[in-house]
Image (tube, grey):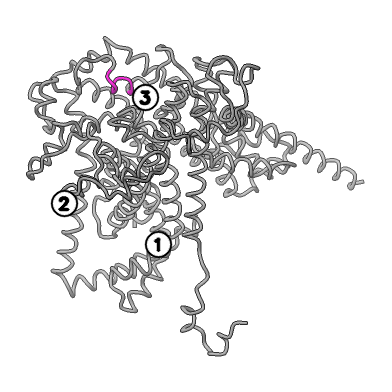
Amino acid sequence: MSTPVRTSRRSSIRGGETASGWLFTAPMIVLLGMFLVVPVLMALWVSFSDWNGRGSPFSSTVSFVGVDNYSALLGGGGLAEQDFGTALRNNAWYVLLVVPIQTMLSLFLAVLVNRQILRGRGFFRTAFYFPSVTSSVAITVLWLFLFSSTGAVNKLLAFIGINGPNWFNDPSGVLHNILGVFGVENGPAALTGNSFLGISFWEWLAGPSVAMSAFILMAVFTTSGTFMLLFIAALQNLSGDVVEAAVMDGANGWQRFWRVTLPQLRPTLFTVLTLGLIGAWQVFDQIYTGTQGGPGKTTLTPAYLSYQSAFTNQAWGQGAAIAFILFVIIVVFTLFQRWVLAERKVSARRMRPYLQSPTSGGFK
Amino acid sequence: MSATLTPSVRTPSPSKRLKSLSREQLPTRAVAGRSLLYAMLIVLAIVYVAPFLIQVATSFKTDADAASNPMSLIPATWSSAAYERLFLNSDFPVWFRNSAIVTVFVTLGRVFFNSLAGYALARLHFRGRNVIFALLIAVMSVPGVVLLIPKFLVINQLGIYDTYVAMIVPLLTDAAGVFIMKNFFESIPASVEEQARIDGAGTFRVFWSIVLPMARPALVTIIILSFQGSWNELSHFIVATQSPELTTLTKGVASLASGQLSQGTQYPLKLAAAAIMTIPVAVMFFIFQKRIMNTTDGAVKE
């Protein structure tokens, strides 16, 4: 008697769960599908088409142009290629500087703030984190003021006898400027004569422009607080036993940090580097608000160029193509980093001292 | 919880012992080290805080004063001209209203839809759940900036371009928020809901009156993230709207920065606008500060 009742109830519960499972996830599926998956597919089509922004991209007047948009960017020899190369150069320098600096600074802040003896650590944490909650638009407005030619930063530099640059109007590359101090004004012919993506190797090596450097400082200023919190959380979760053991073994503070604490922070370090890398390739708000790619296109980034190509120049196919190339760049960088930071087996040579009997080291 | 608390309770005692030991043995060195620590922290804190102090101070200066004394924290002559201009003589109130409308709806929507989907993915057994979850992870890895053109295409195709619907609906749920809620629901014991289920409560009833009230900590996280996210959002509004009546604070202030509404630099005006748009997120931050930074409180209370 009880058996059929139980089965029927269970099946009704399971049946109810299937229905409510789909019902509960339906809004998410519809919203993400509609405004994330479908758009990406549409944009993929647009990136292979000659749509000019008028009418529907699926109307019969829009034709398939194959990889034309992509090849114009990656080897067309025209302005599109040159702009794309410039944007990649600018953003690559941005990533190269922002990601390591913000990671080191946030780890440094976390270690300082996490000291047991520290009083008022709540205040310090708040001070370091606060820039992270403000909008990039508000921070950019503030930065435009602080780094204006007669702004606070240049006033501060004047105190120590430095004649500050006209930050957001200075297109000169920082590395070129440093070389210029040593009298190197023009690069060797090998660098100036050959080019990649429409700009010469000498230009690739210009470094970030002075204007871009101000944005780099801004990125470090606004993101270090967020990552500091991640590092603090990780430091709190470390077991004290290992550090104690290291103290007993006579390791000093410096050795303890590099040999004991840092290896244990590897997962967090991975998270911070990944998030930093993904974020740093997506510079858009700051450029839109602050410089619109100027001066001399030295703050142009792929994200902004994609927007500008589509919405300003009506070259929608090209804009979409830039977005997809950027997507690929971000994915490739993330995978590469995952590979570099992956846990590896300790090599046989380094393992040897720890193996008990010499014969057990005999690998087949 | 207890598992994470135990080490933080246990660790202070040996380290305290060590510290008191070293304090007796090497007093001068410890004092020097501590002074260095404080000196570094104070210098860094000044670097982080000063820009905001300068911002607020400058917003009360006259244009000439702002240009000649960009660093001073006290205006030579106090002037509220920038604020009067913003509130009485510009579209600023409209921008503020639009940002507020969008933020309220997006936050409410995310709290509801994210927890609904998160609960289903964590607790309900149904065919297709794993597929949905895999797709969610895939969607989460799409960088937002790549979606600028795609989003415009869909919004345009749907005929909702330049409406509140276009501004709000695409933001109503986010993959990361669903993920947070799913993780949270997996961490709380299922026994309570099972009890209610046996008493005959339906799935939605269990979710709404039993599970959701227990999820308050995670919901606060969602509220913080969506409030901050939608208040500070810029790129979505750029591609979803064009008319001045639908301009949000981020879009409006960005247009101010690039020189509309102003002749000359007009820094006090721009900085005042930027300062006001920071206030709501700052208030939010200070209300939920404990929650945002809860990671270290256990050790502080020791």
Where residue A226 appears, x then y in whole percent? 37, 45
What label sits on residue A182 in the rendered view?
A: 2
Parent chain of label 1 = B
Residue A256 is inside the magenta segment: no
Splitting the image into 4 quarters, where does residue B200 fall? top right
Parent chain of label 3 = B
Depth check, mark 3 against mark 1: the one in front is 3
Range of magenta residues: B254-259
Where residue A288 appears, x then y in whole percent? 36, 28
Observer-nearest of B15 and A213: A213
Seen in the image, is A183 located left or right of residue B105? left
Residue name at image x 60 percent, y 28 percent: A65
Where residue B205 appears, x then y in whole percent? 66, 33
Splitting the image into 4 quarters, where does residue A359 fall? bottom right
Residue name at image x 10 percent, y 23 percent: B65
Parent chain of label 2 = A
- Disc 3 designates what residue? B250
What label sits on residue B9 in the rendered view?
A: 1
Q: Is the magenta stretch mostly helix, strand or loop?
A: helix
Depth check, mark 1 against mark 2: the one in front is 2
Asked whether the residues under marks 3 and 2 belong to the same chain, the reply is: no
Kindly report the distance in space between the C-alpha atoms of the residues bearing marks 1 and 2: 57 Å
Seen in the image, is A135 located left or right of residue B79? right
Kindly report the distance in space between the C-alpha atoms of the residues bearing marks 3 and 2: 44 Å
Residue name at image x 66 percent, y 31 percent: A26
